[in-house]
Amino acid sequence: MLPKLNRKRALFVLTKIDEILAWEKQKEAERDTRFVELGRYLCEVRAGQYWRVENLKSFDEFLERRFPESRRKAYYLMSIHEHLPPHARRELKQVGWSKGLELAKVARRDGQHFDCANWLHKAREMPYEQFRRVVEKELTGKEEEPSELIYFKVYKSQIPVIEQAIETAARMLGSDKSRGYCLEMICADFLAGAHLDDQNRDTLFYSITRFFQFLSGEQQQAFLDSMGERAS
């Protein structure tokens, strides 16, 4: 049986939900605005070497103190300030800093020819994941394969090792590769080593195949020639 509807209580509860969601949206917009401001100040610290006031040796040391878990976010915010025109940065209150980072990628490539109005319109109209895929296709000319977010907990003591491994992989694979690709290559390397001595050759084959895809055309051909010489 349906529960008896308490209309007065229902209106109270629904109103509270709307209030909380509106508050959360307002706080998110405020946070995005402050992040853009933060990126501007960080660029000024680097340009003026303000870190010397604290007797630090470098800008990187300054970031290590302010962003102990990861300096990547700081560089993202600085990239938004450096590459987006001022009127685009003002619009980030509506679209969010995550989309702002994607906009900065296109602006960095296009320079003075950046179609700001068109890209801002897309950023406002599209959910983040869809917008990110559109930017990825624009920059690479390729459709991105379907993706999903994976969540798991790590302890704070584990974060430095994880970040260092991903940053090392990024230097080897190229800075244009996402953190997801870097993590995949770390895992593929582990699996390749783990299955060298057992009978699970399918996993080893998959790992080698994924590594092969990240080689340049010349490197892929050199690898195939080398395998052909060994086979003969």
Image (cartoon, rainbow, N blue to C red):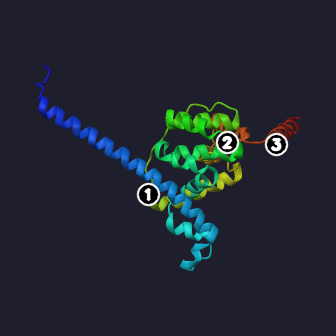
How far apart, in angstroms, are the residues tagged by discs 2 and 3? 34 Å
**x and y percentages locating residue 199 in the rendered image:** 63, 37
Q: Earlier in the sequence, mark 2 or mark 3?
A: 2
Q: Is residue 203 above or below residue 85?
A: above
Is 222 placed left or right of 11 in the picture?
right
* Residue 174 vs residue 108, the one in the foreground: 108
Task: Work out which quarter of the rendered image holds the C terminus and state it.
Answer: top right
* Residue 159 vs residue 87, the one in the foreground: 87
Give the image quarter of residue 42.
bottom right
Marks 3 and 1 close (CB-CB < 8 Å)? no
Question: Circle 1 is placed at which residue position?
Answer: 155
Dot 2: within a 10 Å radius of its alpha carbon, few (fewer than 14), some, or many (20 or more) residues? Answer: some
Question: Circle 3 is placed at which residue position?
Answer: 219
- Under mark 3, the amino acid is Gln
Give the label on residue 200, or none.
none
**x and y percentages locating residue 102 in the rendered image:** 59, 43
Q: Is residue 81 above or below residue 177?
A: below
* Mark 1: secondary structure: loop
